[in-house]
Image: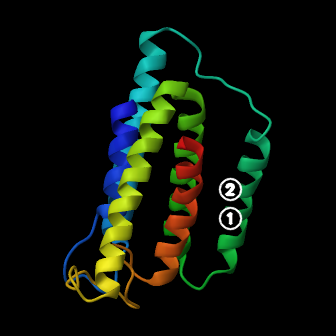
Amino acid sequence: MRTVFCLLVIFVPLALWPGLYNYALVPKQFVLHLLTALLCLLWLRRGYRNSCSLNFSAPLHIPILLWIGSHILSSELTNSGLTACTEILNQISLTTLCLIAAHALSGRDFICVTWAAVLTGLCVSVIGIAQHYGVGFLWIPQAAPPAATWANKNLLAEYMICVIPLTGFLF
């Protein structure tokens, strides 16, 4: 399970498809959904193999379910049902990922996954710095360079905001 989490934090930020400009996040979403589904299967298999109940309770479960429910209810107001479905699936995927991480990773596994995320963040930062100075990686599709492997600067900033605290946690 730790290996799949490490693959997730490495390959989602680095997934890209050269020449794909209009849908630059599609490769990242594909990798995210594929590896989250694999994690779900591994988690269920481990629960079945160990004959333990997968029922769990935590203080945030009800707010998380209410939050996803609000996404589903607000999808009635969107112009595109496909866009609403895509966003709901993204939110369910991310929520499932958090729940599996909270219940399936030991402390040592969490440290390993955190190191993988931090080292991947370092690689993404180096790519962004190289793009800023025009040294390399200019072939990566972006709306507003330098954005490293993300579609625009804002997505890169969101990713870095998530990775920087993990760096502080390790040191």
Colour convention of the picture: rainbow
Q: Is residue 162 left or right of residue 11?
A: right
Could you tell me which residue is drawn at 43 percent across and 51 percent down? 118
Instruction: Classify mark 2: helix, strand or loop.
Output: helix
Q: Is residue 77 left or right of residue 136?
A: right
Question: x, y percentage for residue 84?
Answer: 56, 72
Quarter of the image that includes the N terminus: top left
Question: x, y percentage for residue 140?
Answer: 24, 80
The kind of residue tagged 1 is: His
Question: x, y percentage for residue 71?
Answer: 68, 64
Question: How far is mark 2 from mark 1, CA to CA?
Answer: 5 Å
Could you tell me which residue is drawn at 63 percent across and 81 percent down? 78
Please give the label number shown on residue 71: 1
Residue closer to the observer: 132 or 105 = 132
Please give the label number shown on residue 149: none
Residue 101 image-quadrant placement? top right
* Residue bearing mark 2: 68
Residue 96 image-quadrant placement? top right
Residue closer to the observer: 64 or 77 = 64
